Image (cartoon, rainbow, N blue to C red):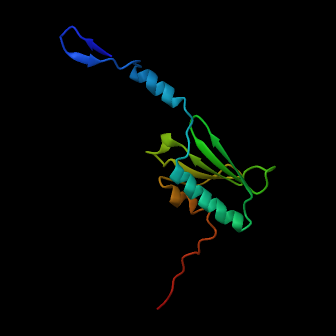
C-alpha cells in the first residue's frame, strides 16, 4: 500500500512498527541456544567419549542467560561435566566454560575447540622427541 505524505513524497506502509527498546526486550526473552557448528563440535567429542566407554547420556538445556550441554555416565546421576555457553561473558573471560561435577570451572575461554580440549582424553599428549 502506498500513501502520500504531507511533503508530497511516496512512502510504503511498513506495517507494524515496534520501538527498538521493546524489540530488544523481546529478543532478550529468547533462550540462548547452540549454533549448528558449535553443536557439531560438542557432539563429535561426545561420540568419541561414548565409543571409549566414558560417557553414556547427555542433556541440552536452553536457558534465558546460558545454554548447557550436560554429560552423564549414567542417566540417574548428576552430570560429570557441563559445557556452558554464556554470551554475556564473551568479551570478558570468554563465552565458553567446562564445569566439573563438583561445580568447579575446569576451563574457560573464547574458543569452543580450545575449551573442549580439557575433556578430550582421546588426543595424544605432546611429547618431546630428541633427534
Residue 78 pos. (x, y %): 76, 49
In the image: residue 97, left or right of residue 18:
right
Q: Residue at x 65, y 42 (%)?
A: 61
Residue, far bottom: 131
Residue, far front: 1
Residue 115 pos. (x, y %): 54, 58
Residue 107 pos. (x, y %): 57, 56
Residue, far left: 8
Which quadrant does the N terminus fall into? top left
**Vertical side of 8 occupied by 20: above or below:** below
- Between residue 32 and residue 102, name the one nearer to us: 32
Q: Residue at x 59, y 62 (%)?
A: 118
- Between residue 69 and residue 92, name the one nearer to us: 69
Q: Residue at x 48, y 48 (%)?
A: 93
Q: Residue at x 18, y 11 (%)?
A: 8
**Vertical side of 90 occupied by 112: above or below:** below
Q: Toward which corner of the image does residue 14 lie, by quadrant?
A: top left
In the image: residue 28, left or right of residue 15:
right
Residue 24 pos. (x, y %): 45, 27
- Between residue 107 and residue 123, name the one nearer to us: 123
- Between residue 2 and residue 127, name the one nearer to us: 2
Q: Toward which corner of the image does residue 51 lie, by quadrant?
A: bottom right
Amino acid at each position: 500500500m502506498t500513501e502520500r505524505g504531507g511533503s508530497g513524497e511516496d512512502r510504503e506502509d511498513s506495517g507494524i512498527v515496534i520501538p527498538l527498546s521493546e524489540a530488544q526486550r523481546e529478543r532478550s526473552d529468547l533462550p540462548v541456544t547452540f549454533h549448528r557448528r558449535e553443536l557439531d563440535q560438542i557432539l563429535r567429542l561426545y561420540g568419541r567419549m561414548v565409543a571409549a566407554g566414558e560417557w553414556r547420556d547427555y542433556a541440552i538445556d536452553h536457558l534465558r542467560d546460558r545454554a548447557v550441554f550436560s554429560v552423564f555416565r549414567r542417566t540417574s546421576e548428576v552430570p560429570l561435566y557441563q559445557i556452558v555457553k554464556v554470551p554475556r561473558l564473551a568479551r570478558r573471560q570468554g563465552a565458553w566454560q567446562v564445569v566439573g561435577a563438583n561445580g568447579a570451572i575446569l576451563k574457560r575461554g573464547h574458543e569452543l575447540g580450545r575449551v573442549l580440549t580439557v575433556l578430550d582424553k582421546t588426543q595424544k599428549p605432546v611429547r618431546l622427541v630428541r633427534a
